[in-house]
Image (tube, rainbow, N blue to C red):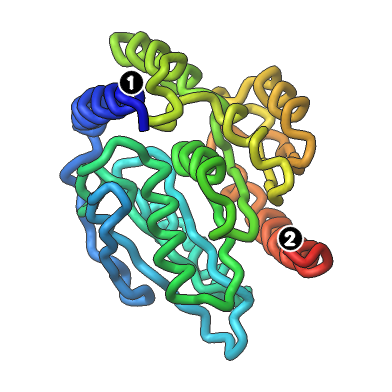
Amino acid sequence: MSQAALSVSWRAKIFSIFFMRIMFSRVQGWKNDIPTRAKKFDRIALDGSSLEGAIHESQNLKPLGVVILCHPFVKYGMHYFFKNELDIELTKLGYHVVSFNFKGFGRSNIKGHAYFNDVLSIGQSLREQYPNLPIHLIGCSFGGFHLSHALAQNTSLFTSAVLDSVPCSVNVYFKKGILSHAMAWLSSSKLAPITGTQPIKDSLKKVNNFPLLFLHGASDNYLPEADVEELRALCASIQFKKFEECKHLEIIKKYRSDYLQLVSQFFNDSLQNQRITGK
């Protein structure tokens, strides 16, 4: 690595950790115990962060695979999925379900500067734990944003990914105040790829052969139609599904049965296509 690259990496780490501690001040400190239906675990991430997670295993004798759930930007982190019982639904379908807290949420601490490393760390650990099972991803909003950048780093750990209500850039989320100016600068600077703050199109266009399903609500304020159309034009292999009368993160609330059927069919199709192509 060149001295210039090392300099950028060092500056990115210092700036990002400082920025994250400010940004996460309103979510840090909220902790809750894992529900008894799941088993708690801790993993040391690639960047040294300690990640809190939980696995809810399916009772199927022949599980269909593993699903990693990447949570949105809410104070209760991975408990978002326990609250809406997505883990229960997916285990009934035959999947082991893994939830985890990104660094800065719950009991996950901040040692590094890029959230995509959290996704890769959990994926790598599960690949070792379940070497013969496909590993799928579901990322909601914030979780899907960083999942997208993780795929640009490494797709070999995973079989497919569902992006649910994922903003195409950080600028649509941070709209006011000092944070909006800081994020606008960061997401277009040399630090963007290192910190994982660039628009998701920059990462997803690099993984055009990887199965991706993009779910979006017709009334999602964080997903302007123009952003969706730009992503569609740049990333031809992504499947898109729009849900009417849905605001941000409302799809599973209003279309629960359709959501589960669509996701499970997508996982199955992705695995079948992988077998056909021999990948």
Residue farthest along the bottom direction in this orientation: 61
Q: Nearer the viewer, residue 276 or 79?
A: 276
Give residue 270's mark: 2
Q: For the residues marked 1 and 2, what is the alpha-carbon distance in whole angstroms?
A: 40 Å
Q: Amino acid at mark 2?
A: Ser
For disc 1, the neighbor class at 10 Å (few under 14, some 14 to 19, many from 20) is: few
**Residue at horizontal 29 percent and vertical 66 percent from the top:** 34
Q: Is residue 214 visible?
A: yes
Give residue 4's mark: 1
The C terminus lies in which quarter of the figure? Answer: bottom right
x then y, percent, for residue 262? 73, 56
x then y, percent, for residue 62? 61, 86
Q: Amino acid at mark 1?
A: Ala
Asked which secondary structure carries label 2, the reply is helix
Looking at the image, residue 140 lies above or below residue 186: below
The N terminus lies in which quarter of the figure? Answer: top left
Task: Judge from the rendering whether residue 216 lies leftward or rightward of residue 42; answer left or right.
Answer: right
Asked which secondary structure carries label 1, the reply is helix
Residue farthest along the left direction in this orientation: 29
Give residue 48's mark: none
**Number of numbered labels in the structure image:** 2
**Residue at horizontal 66 percent and vertical 60 percent from the top:** 260
Task: Judge from the rendering whether residue 232 lies leftward or rightward of residue 45; answer left or right.
Answer: right
For disc 2, the neighbor class at 10 Å (few under 14, some 14 to 19, many from 20) is: many
